[in-house]
């Protein structure tokens, strides 16, 4: 008897009112939910990390440079749900993160 292969459902395939087992967003690409996307401008960013601290989805990508200073490197659009918190919390007067309409 051949073992039946199972695959996890995407967010769009889940039935309305379905109960799913506990998990993390790492296993699902939840970025398809958003209607707006944050756009990061590396030239305006001061790397204060307020966006990273504020993001509820851990979608702000960071790394340490050669001097061991943590810097923002981009946005993880696979998991960003477009809530806009990062753009709202950015302290730069000419915003380093702006929200734009999502395009598919």
Image: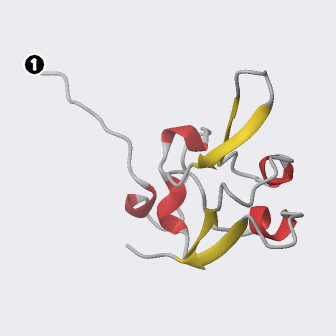
Q: Position of residue 21 (x, y in %)?
A: 56, 40
Q: Residue furthest bottom?
A: 101
Residue drawn at (78%, 47%) of the image: 52
The residue drawn where x is 50% and y is 51% is 78
State how the image is colored. Answer: secondary structure
In percent of width and height, residue 3 lies at 18, 22
Question: Where residue 10 appears, x then y in whole percent?
Answer: 40, 53
**Which residue is pictured at 80% across the width and 73% down the height?**
94
Quarter of the figure with the C terminus:
bottom left
The residue labelled by disc 1 is 1
Split into 4 quadrants, where in the image is the N terminus? top left
Q: Is residue 21 left or right of residue 15?
A: right
Note whether 60 is above or below 103 in the view shown: above
Horizontal arrangement in the rendering, residue 7 relative to residue 25 (left or right): left
Relative vertical location of residue 93 with respect to residue 43 in this rendering, above or below: below
| Numbered circles on residues, count | 1
Residue 79 spot, x, y in % from top left: 56, 51
Q: Is residue 43 left or right of residue 29?
A: right
Q: Give the residue drawn at x 65%, y 49%.
A: 59
Camera-side residue: 8 or 30?
A: 30
Q: Secondary structure at mark 1?
A: loop
Considering depth in this image, is 32 or 90 the residue closer to the camera? 90
Left or right of 83? Residue 54 is right
59 vs 67, nearest the viewer: 67
Q: How many other residues sit within 10 Å of disc 1, few (<14), some (14-19) or many (≥20)?
A: few
Say above or below: 51 vs 37: above
């Amino acid at each position: 008897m051949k073992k039946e292969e199972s695959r996890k459902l995407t967010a769009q395939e889940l039935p309305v009112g379905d109960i799913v087992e506990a998990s993390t967003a790492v296993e699902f690409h939840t970025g398809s939910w958003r209607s707006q996307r944050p756009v990061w401008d590396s030239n305006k960013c001061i790397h204060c990390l307020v966006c990273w601290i504020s993001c509820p989805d851990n979608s702000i990508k960071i790394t340490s440079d050669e001097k061991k200073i943590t810097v923002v490197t981009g946005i993880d659009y696979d998991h960003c749900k477009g809530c806009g918190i990062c753009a709202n919390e950015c302290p730069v007067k000419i915003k380093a993160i702006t929200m734009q309409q999502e395009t598919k």
